[in-house]
Amino acid sequence: MIKQLNIVIKDTLRANFKSRGYWILVLSPLIFVAVIGGVAFGVTQLQGNTTPTVAVIGQTSERATFVQSAKNLDMKISKITNEKQADKALKSENLDGVLTLKSDSATLTTQPKSEQVPKDDIATILNQLSQAKKATQYGLTAAQTADFMKPVNFKTVVKQANQSESGANTEGANYAIAVAIGVITMFVVMWYTSMIANAIANEKSSRIMEILLAATSARIQYFGKLIGVFLLALTHMLIYLIAGFATVIFLKDNVFVKMITSNLNGVTTGFMLYALAFILIAVALYLVLTAMIASLINDNAQVQQAVQPISFLAMIGYMFSYFMTFMPNNIAIRALSYVPFVSQSMMPVRLVTHVEGWPTALISLGISFISLILLAWFGQGIYAKNVLSYSDEPIMKQITGKLLKK
């Protein structure tokens, strides 16, 4: 039995792994991302230096503050200190802006072709300078002035019954991964449910299924196809992970790569493992459901009928995940967070937003895993019963007809 199962798994892997369609499926998103990245890089290079140059006209001490802050502001401070020379340079487009500082006001003048000048950051420094000037006028010492200008140490902490978590970077990174679970699951389901449905449809329409079942049992064919397609999906995801790590290693100095890696630095190992487990279980659940429904297919023309309702089901959880932020305590949303096929898009988001704790999150994962085992066991009977039956009726009509008979 094990030998026959291995043969079916290898045959499923070999047939799809060598096909042009599989590699188009795997490589087309990578090629698309590479092209977009290449275009963005080319545009950046052609654009040249985008750091704005600003002349600061005012008192020496105030100008010195902007010179010291130029790196943080991501702009260059011109050596021009004369207002007339600065205006002349601005008109000739040799400057991007002129910041004129007076006793109680400041004016930033730019020209239409100026690079983007960080106005909000400049306003922040001006407020600090104003506060320091007023503190001096009120007779405050240097220590009192520094204490007066010291910003409030503000942080957020969300307390739960048995734990407390803080850190905006960690929460943001985990939230990004939580939302990504729904997106990844939806796309993997759309790609691989049609693959397993087409495989069953080809065998039934060509009447090869009768020959296969004469050599092996329906159970072997059922589990062999499921495991084979699941391993293809797993290989697909591993290729993307390797491509992602390679991008981080070889393009570590790229601005966009730095931004992504800095955001993902806060991802916790526990949540990463939880996310991976939920994705794999959810994909397996959808493949089992597809195999059950695909056993009713008569020929290739009915593949879309079988796959379409499964794709809609995958999108339900993805769409509901957007509503959870606004109404996390809605009864329907709380209930759906425990329902297999949609919980993978909902419970991880509820976990990282601290609406639910780890115990309930693990219960939801456990329900999905138990459902996978039960559905896979129940599905083999459905597959064996229908895989040799042929009907010209629409798939949904066959399903509802069988349910009504029962």
Image (tube, rainbow, N blue to C red):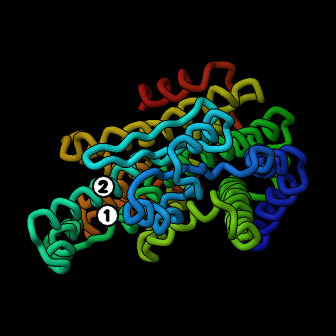
The answer to whether residue 167 is above or below residue 216 is: below
- Identify the residue shown where x is 21% and y is 67%: 149
Instruction: Give the total number of marks visible in the rendering.
Output: 2
Q: Nearer the viewer, residue 209 or 371?
A: 371
Asked whether the residues under the numbered discs 1 and 2 touch, taking CB atoms below 8 Å apart as contact, a structural biologist would say: yes
Kind of residue at disc 1: Ala
Instruction: Pinpoint residue 15: horizontal percent, then vertical percent.
Output: 87, 53
Instruction: Pinpoint residue 223: horizontal percent, then vertical percent.
Output: 66, 59
Instruction: Pinpoint residue 30: horizontal percent, then vertical percent.
Output: 76, 51
- Identify the residue shown where x is 74% and y is 42%: 200
Judge from the rendering whether residue 152 lies leftward or rightward of residue 35; answer left or right: left
Residue tagged by mark 2?
A: 350
Instruction: Pinpoint residue 143: horizontal percent, then vertical percent.
Output: 17, 80
Name the disc covering residue 361, or none: 1
Q: Nearer the viewer, residue 28 or 79?
A: 79
Kind of residue at disc 2: Arg
The crowding category of the residue bearing disc 2, from other C-alpha atoms within 10 Å (few below 14, some 14 to 19, many at least 20), is many
Nearer the camera: disc 1 or disc 2: 2
